[in-house]
Amino acid sequence: MAADCEAWLNSNPVEVDNVSDSFESEDEKNTGTLVANKNISNEVNGNWLLSSSSSIHEARLKAKAKRRLRKNSSRDSGRGDSLSDNGDLVRGTAVAPTSPKSKLLDRKSRLGKGRGLPKKGGAGGKGVWGRSGEVYEPEQVDEKDPNYDEAQENCVYETVVPPLDERDFEKTVTPIVQEYFEHGDTNEVAELLADLNLGPMRSEVPSLAVSLALEAKASQRELTSKLLADLCGPVLFRSDMEKSFDKLLQELPDLVLDTPGAPQLMGQFIARAVRDQILSKSYIESYKGRVGCEYTRAALDRAAVLLKMSKGGVRIDNQWGIGGGQRPVTQLVKEMNLLLKEYILSGDSKEAERCLKDLEVPHFHHEFVYEALVMVLESKGEKTFKMLLQLLKLLSVSSIITVDQMRRGYERVYMDIAEINIDVPRAYFILEQFVEKSFNMGIIDVKLRDLCPCRGRKRFVSEGDGGVIKTES
C-alpha cells in the first residue's frame, strides 16, 4: 500500500488539502502546499539526495506528507474508500464498525470450522473426570517407589460393621419389631436384621419380640409367631430359639408383674413354636422333673395341653386369630352379628364394647351400625329397640364408633329400606321412630334425621273425583 501511494505521489502531486489532517496548524499547511507544488527532483529510487539544507527540509516535509497520506488511506480502507485511476478519492458505502465485545465470549471457531463440540470430547479442562464411557486400566505398582509396601499389594478392603452390644441392641431392634407390628412384612425385618452384626446377641431377638408381643394385641402376637417362623433359618438358628425361650421362662416372674396372663400366653407361644418346627418336640419333655417356678410349670403345662389338642384335630396355626383388616368381610359380618345377639341376651354393654375393640376394624364399624338397625327393624318387641339404642349411644359417647361411621351406617339403611320393607311391612314406621329417638339422644344430627325416608300413603278422595288417587307424604 505504501509503495502504491509513493508511486502515485511521484507521478501526480497531491494537494495538501486532500491529505492533511483536520487538526494541523497554519505553518504545516503552508509548507505542505509549497512541497506539493514543487517538482520532486531530489528523490531517486526512493532515496533522498542531500544537496543542501533546503533540500533536506523539503525532504522532511515530503516524508511527513506521505505519512499523513498513509494514515488517512489506512483509516478509510475499512470504510470502503479507494483511489481511482485519476487519483481521486472514491467513497464507498459506510459500514458500521463492529464492536469487538460481541466476539469477546464467542467460543466458536474463528475459521468457521468445527461442529461446536467441547474440546477433547469433554475430557479436558480443570476438574473433569474424563470422557463418558472411559475405562481406566488398573494402576501399575512401582516397586521402586519409596512408599511401596509389599505386604499391602494384595490387600482386600471390606466394610466391617461392629457387633452390637447390650445397650445398642435394644435401641436398634425394638423399633424394627414395633414397625413390623404395623406393616407385617417379615422379609423387611429379615433384611434389616441381616444388615446388623448381631453376633452373640442373635439369641436375644426372639425374646425381645415375644416380650413386646405379651403387652400387645392378639393380632400382633399372631404376627410375632409368624415372624419367628420366618426368621428361623435365614437369620436365626434353632439353638438361638431354644436359648431365647429358656431365658423367657426364667424371666416369667418378672413378666407376670406387667402381664398377669404371661404364663398362659407363653405356653401358647411355645406350642406354636413346636408346631412351626422352630423348637424340637422334646423341648417340653426336657423340663420334666427340674422345674421349681410355678409360672414356668403353668406355661409348660399349657403348651403340652395345646399340643395334645392339636393331635385331636384342633389347629394351632391360627390360635391368636387374624388381625383386623386381614380378616375376610364375611367373617367380620358374622362376628358382629354374634356380638349383637350376645349383647341382647346378656345386656352387658362393657363386654360388647370390648369385643368390638378386639375386632380391630375401626374402618368397618359402619357395618356394625347397619346390622344393629336391621336387627331393630326385624325385631318384634321393645326390648331390642331400647337396648340397641342404648348401645349405640354408649359407643357414640366413647368415640369407639366415629360420627362418620355412624352416618354411613344410617345412610346404608336408608338406601336398603325399600328391600327391607318387602320382608318387614312396618319397616318405615319403625325406622322413623328409631331415627327420631337417635336424634333426641344426640347420636345423629339434624341433617341425617331429615334424610330419613318415609313411605307415601295413597287414598281415594271421593266418587265425584272419578277415582283419582292422591299421594301424601
Image: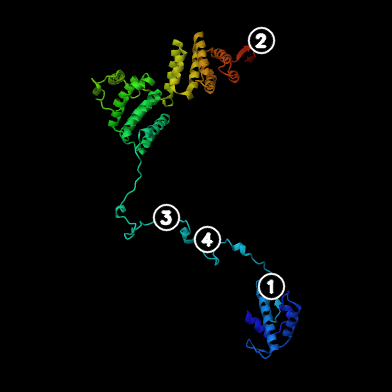
Residue 216: image location, x then y, percent: 40, 24
Q: Quadrant of residue 404?
A: top right
| Residue situated in front as seen by the camera: 229 or 344 | 229
Please give the label number shown on residue 274: none
Q: CA distance from mark 2 to mark 3?
A: 100 Å
Q: Quadrant of residue 294?
A: top left
293 vs 158: above or below: above
Please give the label number shown on residue 133: 3
Residue 357: image location, x then y, percent: 45, 20
Between tags 2 and 3, which lies in front?
3
Please give the label number shown on residue 92: 1
The crowding category of the residue bearing disc 3, from other C-alpha atoms within 10 Å (few below 14, some 14 to 19, many at least 20), is few
Q: Are marks 4 and 1 in contact (CB under 8 Å)?
A: no
Q: Answer with mark 2 or mark 1, whichever residue precedes in sequence.
A: 1
Q: Answer with mark 3 or mark 4, whichever residue precedes in sequence.
A: 4
Q: CA distance from mark 3 to mark 1?
A: 56 Å
